[in-house]
Image (cartoon, rainbow, N blue to C red):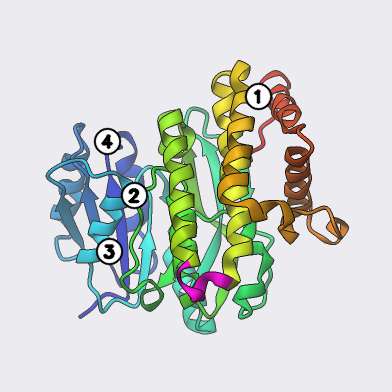
Amino acid sequence: MNPRVNVIVPVYNVAPYLTVFFESLMNQTFQDFDVWVVNDKSTDSSLEIIKYYADKVPSKIHVINNSVNMGLCEARNAGLSQCDSNGEYILLLDPDDYIEITYMEKMVNVADKYHADLTICGMERFDDRTGKCICKEMINNPEEVITDIMNFEMLGYMNPVVWNKLFRRTVIGEIKFTTIKRSEDTVFLFSVLPNIRSIKFVNEILYHYRLRDTSLSGSISDEIYESMLEGFKETKEKFCSDSRYKAFMDLFVVQMFIRCGLGGACRLSFRNMKKAPYYVKKTKKYMDEYFPEWRENRYLSLRQCWKRKFHAFAVSCTATLYKIHLFVLFIYAYWLISNVCKRDFRV
């Protein structure tokens, strides 16, 4: 019998966290699922832990061993290609996190009840060293089913990560992850948007995301940043050649600005504050050359900004700082609050 949910789990050198992850997954109150674990040529003891759980439930856990390290995107693609194509839903989880035991039950029940193509739950970010909750996200969303997808402004601002989202299998189809080294989830989400007819939120914390110094999302380098810039550029070219994406371009540009203009520029600057002006100048030049419409984007403008929620208002303000050549001051202030005042907040 085909599983209702296929769970894709890419694994690379996360042995210290795998037991917690698998225990949270295998103890789910909803059990109609199969797991496709893609071991991406791990060099630690990850494979031994995977085999331990696979031996316990061989009919449920399927192991795919990459012969070489392919990276996160290709590992996920391997899982998507080999999982049961008759499964109704897809989950894309990270193996260094953990989920509430009711995660799958609540997500599937809501998706079934409201016929949602995309179901999204709340998440907590916690510090790996202290276990302290850093922030909670995605718990104050609309209660109603979202069907006017093209005009749903929140798509431009919400966290595009895939692991707190349950996808109906048919909306993914043959779409795969690109080889971009960062913001791959943004590109993937916007790639499937034209196929999504309804979105439903579960406004409670069901996913626990571990922030660690060595995680992909916690690190950035010039090489990774260049890959992200090139990835957004190539994605825009692809979207512009397909009329189905035209209605989502304004929101895609907002996500580009948040990921590159805010997140990328700030995190790179934090590695070397002396280079902050350089990174700001480089990013602004990139946006002007490949995304010139960012300057007139209605979501990045201060016009009628008082009608927006705080996060959207803040993004508009930072875009204005870019336009008047003062964004570097925001980076200095952000660094001061984060490192001197010891206050945690994220861009």
Q: In which quarter of the image is residue 20?
A: top left
Alpha carbon of mark 3 to alpha carbon of mark 1: how far? 41 Å
Question: Considering the numbered disc 4 on the image, is that residue within a helix, a strand or a loop?
Answer: loop
Sequence-first tag of 2 and 1: 2
Alpha carbon of mark 3 to alpha carbon of mark 4: how far? 21 Å
Sequence-first tag of 1 and 4: 4
Determine the residue positioned at 57% across, 59% down: 252
- Whether 175 is among the magenta residues is no
Q: State the residue position of label 4.
A: 13
- Looking at the image, which is closer to me, 126 or 154? 154
Predominant SS of the magenta segment: helix
Q: Is residue 65 above or below residue 307?
A: above
Q: State the residue position of label 2.
A: 179
* Discs 3/1, front: 1
Alpha carbon of mark 2 to alpha carbon of mark 1: how far? 29 Å
Q: Is residue 227 left or right of residue 198?
A: left
Dots 3, 2 in contact, CB < 8 A: no
Q: Bounds of the magenta span? A: 241-246
Q: Which mark is residue 277?
A: 1
Question: Considering the numbered disc 3 on the image, is that residue within a helix, a strand or a loop?
Answer: helix
x, y percent for residue 24: 37, 52
Quarter of the image that includes the C terminus: top right
Q: Residue 80 carries which label?
A: 3
Alpha carbon of mark 4 to alpha carbon of mark 2: how far? 20 Å
Q: Which amino acid does label 1 sit on?
A: Pro
